[in-house]
Amino acid sequence: MNDEEEQFMRPRVYSCCKCRNQVCLHDDIISKDFQGRHGRAFLLSHSMNIDVGQKEDRQLMTGLHTVADIYCSDCREVLGWKYERAYEETQKYKEGKYILEKAKIIRDNW
């Protein structure tokens, strides 16, 4: 396999903007149309190499949610949050999902 073929076979990943720790796969993105504290954000089904903080109720643009900030497991940079609970029925699909802010992650391996 040549370098170009090998590059094509590797999964596309996003990494922490500070330390380059891999935090999610491109394939885990559910939506790119979310808003974070610092601008645009991705909604993801899964994230890796992160630590989950304390749960707290937060009033977001779409209503009241119980969320927990997520941190890079290497450098502790806050990358976004995890939806623990949605109080409105129309928002229940977010439960257990992750928000990663585009300003806090970079593309890696692509």
Image: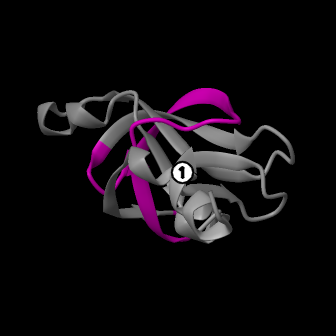
Q: Is residue 36 left or right of residue 7?
A: left
> Which element is circle 1 on?
loop
Q: Residue beneath label 1, please?
A: 11
Q: Nearer the viewer, residue 72 or 64?
A: 72
Q: Where the C terminus falls, by quadrant? A: bottom right
Residue 59 within the magenta-colored segment of the rendering: yes
Q: Residue at x 58, y 54 (%)?
A: 13
Tell me which segment is drawn in magenta: 37-63
Q: Where the N terminus falls, by quadrant? A: bottom right
**x and y, in percent, of residue 74 in the image:** 85, 42
What amino acid type should be assigned to the residue bearing mark 1?
Pro
Q: Residue at x 55, y 38 (%)?
A: 47
Indicate the quadrant where residue 16 lies: bottom right
Q: Nearer the viewer, residue 90 or 27?
A: 27
**x and y, in percent, of residue 106 in the image:** 64, 67
Q: Residue at x 63, y 40 (%)?
A: 70
Q: Is residue 63 left or right of residue 74?
A: left
